[in-house]
Image (tube, helix red, strand yellow):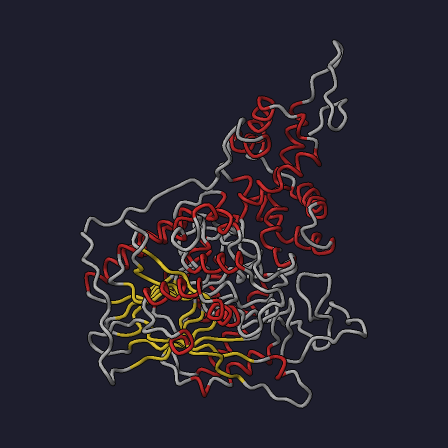
Amino acid sequence: MRRRGGSPGHRQRRSDREQEPDRSSEAAQLRRLWMALGLALALADSLVLWVPVGAHPLPTQGHTARLKRIAPQLRHTFSWWNLTCPVCKSLFTVIDIGLKQEPNVARVGSMAIKLCNLLKIAPPAVCQSAVQLFQGDMVEVWTRSVLSPSEACGLLLGPNCGHWDVFSSWNISLPAVPKPPPRPPRPPAPGAPVSRVLFLTDLHWDHGYLEGADPDCVEPLCCRQGSGLPPASRPGAGHWGEYSKCDLPLWTLESLLSGLGPAGPFDMVYWTGDIPAHDIWQQSRKDQLRALTTITALVKKFLGPVPVYPAVGNHESTPVNGFPPPFVQGNHSSRWLYEAMAKEWEPWLPAEALHTLRIGGFYALSPYPGLRLISLNMNFCSRENFWLLINSTDPAGQLEWLVGELQAAEDRGDKVHIIGHIPPGHCLKSWSWNYYRIVARYENTLAGQFFGHTHVDEFEVFYDEETLSRPLAVAFLAPSATTYIGLNPGYRVYQIDGNYPGSSHVVLDHETFILNLTQANAPGATPQWQRLYRALETYGLPNALPAAWHDLVYRMRGDTRLFQTFWFLYHKGHPPSEPCGPPCRLATLCAQLSARADSPALCRHLVPEDSLQDVHSLWPRPLFC
């Protein structure tokens, strides 16, 4: 902040008669700026879909990394180089006091709009609408956050003035029960029952989809009312969807669900969220509830008596990514959403599951004797959940609850499946590392992990913590139903060791199905959902156990042709035109080994040691989820 009488970039010699700056006025101005910065950064995290996506998008960064990245630009823009460390800490001490008072939301919002435009986070109209949507929750978060003067000034002025680490480390206590020796699952006997589990994720229904609209508009989401028409030289959005930054019309989701016959029959369905579209700058609670009720009714219509087990996605709330822990009460809480989910999903879930769903958006149940299903609310691990700035330590006590469920399952001799939206390798570091440790402890009990969120087809391997070399679990990340960005619509079917005494309940194989948009949108064509590939057959795997996926990664390192097959399937049969060269290939393969966030050591055998950090920075964390 410029001192009174100063000019950008030059300190003015203080005359004997010059007055000291008005600290209370300066603090109030900086307080509004600080909250506006937080609001603008929440938009940056949420509107990352505005960033053009390439063959290997940059990593999802979250608030901390994004703040560090733009801090130099902000210092320059607001002339913060005139702010000394002692003055900075004095100002933020006043801010801490001032944040306990009622802030002026409108003034904060006005400043956030300016920052959003300045940082080119989104087009001006989107900045305006998004700030109005986010400002109430963000001001509430920043007034309740525990950011210290040292942390704030460390961010603004550098490490010599303080340390910025709002997401501090924490650990979950594990039971004192000794871990049993590792017991790899036995292959099922010939003729043993096999369960077929339909996996749906990231449907992203756009109620405003408009055939013929511009698929390359200036807004973050196109192919819809308000996108305008494309120039005469370019075609408009196709009837069934488009290879662009567009979501799906309802009739494509109806086609998907009505055309499931050849892929079935199914014993159950795992559905891991993200129901609404990516028009996140203009969504109301009414919009989100309409998406929830409409798509739930569609699933019930076409799947009938098949049990469906959902998980909460990051797009279900509004503002997007905004999932306050249960200690936040009143209008800012997520009660409006969880209660609606409990009402819509009551036919599928027992009373015990509905109880915890209403509290924190997670639950556990037993689909079969000997199998426990745990649905996690992965928004409590999310880098983009701005409510975790208040307190990120095991939000809602979910991991402690998970440990209790796993220990009880181990005691009973049950197996466990975990479903969730955001994969553990994409979570905040402490949450991710604790989850990794829990998976390692209960490796004999955990039979499967199933996630979505990235929109692409991948996996994450877990290793023993002692050597980081023995594969002990794998999380499957299934591709999206939506086309966003530039993909075919798709879904996944898992073949799982079936329902019989002594079943391992592990994944035996999986198949991915797509709708080829080029063919479907051709004149006179009808949509034909087709199997894209079978995992074991395509990759030459002996089984679908963790070691097989570990070996596949190392085979792809030396076999370019095999990797290109993976790259094609990773994008559901429609890869980007930009080729994936050696750095991209290593980064993509490294991501498959990295179920623990911010842990380059997991790739140390895959990538030369002097290249680990460079490859880690290129992790293909898609920006469109």
Q: Quadrant of residue 190?
A: bottom left
Residue displayed at 40% across by 41% down: 169
User: Where is residue 364 shown, x and y percent of the image?
Assistant: 33, 64
Specify the farthest residue to the bottom: 524
105 w.r.t. 273: above or below? above
Residue displayed at 19% across by 61% down: 411
User: Where is residue 478 shown, x and y percent of the image?
Assistant: 46, 69
Q: Quadrant of residue 415?
A: bottom left
463 with respect to 86 (left or right): left
93 w.r.t. 308: above or below? above
- For the image, the number of numbered tags is 0
Specify the farthest residue to the right: 232
| Quarter of the picture holding the C terminus | bottom right
Return the residue nearer the eye: 310 or 347.
Answer: 310
404 with respect to 161 (left or right): left
User: Where is residue 345 shown, x and y percent of the image?
Assistant: 43, 71
| Quarter of the picture holding the N terminus | top right
The reply to whether residue 44 is in sight is: yes
User: Where is residue 564 shown, x and y percent of the image?
Assistant: 51, 69
Specify the farthest residue to the top: 16
Q: Quadrant of residue 5?
A: top right
Return the residue nearer the eye: 11 or 335.
Answer: 11
Residue displayed at 48% across by 53% down: 382
261 with respect to 175 (left or right): right
